Amino acid sequence: MPEILTSNVEFKTNGETAHGFLARPDGDGPFPGVIVVQEWWGIDDHIKDVAQRFAREGFAAFAPDLYHGKATSEPGEAQKLMMGLDMNRASRELVAAAEDLSGQSFIGGGIGATGFCMGGGLALTLACNSTHIKAAAPFYGVNPNPIDKVKDLAGPLFAVYAEHDDFAGESVRNGLETALKQHGKQFEIKTYPGTQHAFFNDTRPDVYAKDAATDAWQKVLALFRHNL
């Protein structure tokens, strides 16, 4: 298995210093980059693990800490943290994170964006807001507001959804598909049968769906390898 490096790093955003978790292959690179956007839990062990999985596949993966040091495993607290998050500020932070990552000496080529739940919506918005993002793979996220932001996507989109999902249900999927077609974007929307929201998170046995998660992961890797 390839050696990887992990570190907590700083970047400038909104006139302040923000932080995040970086995982990348050992060596000088250049490596393609990936922005990994957190779930409502914060930068927890699962998000760090996802970043490290990307690193083992040859990507430099950066997970910006949108909660600024806070994380939880309690659903009630996670909801409070998400509700207290200024989404416009978070979006600006993600754009700044992509800008910072693109300037690192070990980065070559483009940057991809992925995220989960809350982070899925923010990853898709990031792909609309930053020209550094050359491909995006949001997992069960809400759509950008306004949806016409998708006209600014600079690369292909692979959007992952669960069949049984009250957060990102059929209306979300249909709305995204309509807008992507309207603006002539390259995309694939895949809804995995029998799955529930957060099915990719293997730390949650109540919803984790191994076969669907494995298939989605391979498709995301293929998307990023082809376009970054």
Image (cartoon, rainbow, N blue to C red):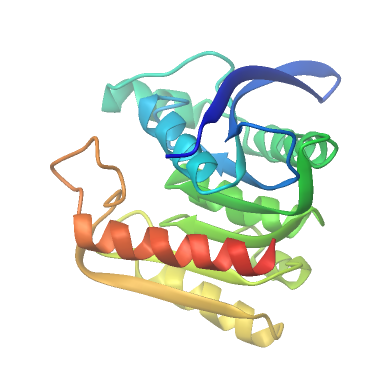
**Considering only vertical position in the picture, is 53 above or below 27?**
below
**Considering only vertical position in the picture, is 209 above or below 90?**
below
Q: How many marks?
A: 0
For the C terminus, the quadrant is: bottom right
Going by the image, does 38 lie left or right of 33? left
> Residue 98 lies in what quarter of the image?
top right
Which residue is depicted at the point 37% across and 63% down? 216
Residue 166 on image: x %, y %: 29, 57
Which residue is depicted at the point 64% across and 57% down? 145
Q: Nearer the viewer, residue 33 or 84?
A: 33
Is there any visible trace of residue 22 in the rendered image?
yes
**Considering only vertical position in the picture, is 192 above or below 123?**
below
Q: Nearer the viewer, residue 84 or 99?
A: 99
> Residue 134 lies in what quarter of the image?
bottom right
Going by the image, does 78 lie left or right of 65? left
**Residue situated furthest left in the rendering:** 206
Going by the image, does 133 lie left or right of 85? right
Which residue is depicted at the point 60% across and 63% down? 225
Going by the image, does 113 lie left or right of 38? right
Residue 52 on image: x %, y %: 47, 35
Is there any visible trace of residue 143 in the rendered image?
no
Residue 158 on image: x %, y %: 52, 69
Which residue is depicted at the point 73% across and 67% down? 153
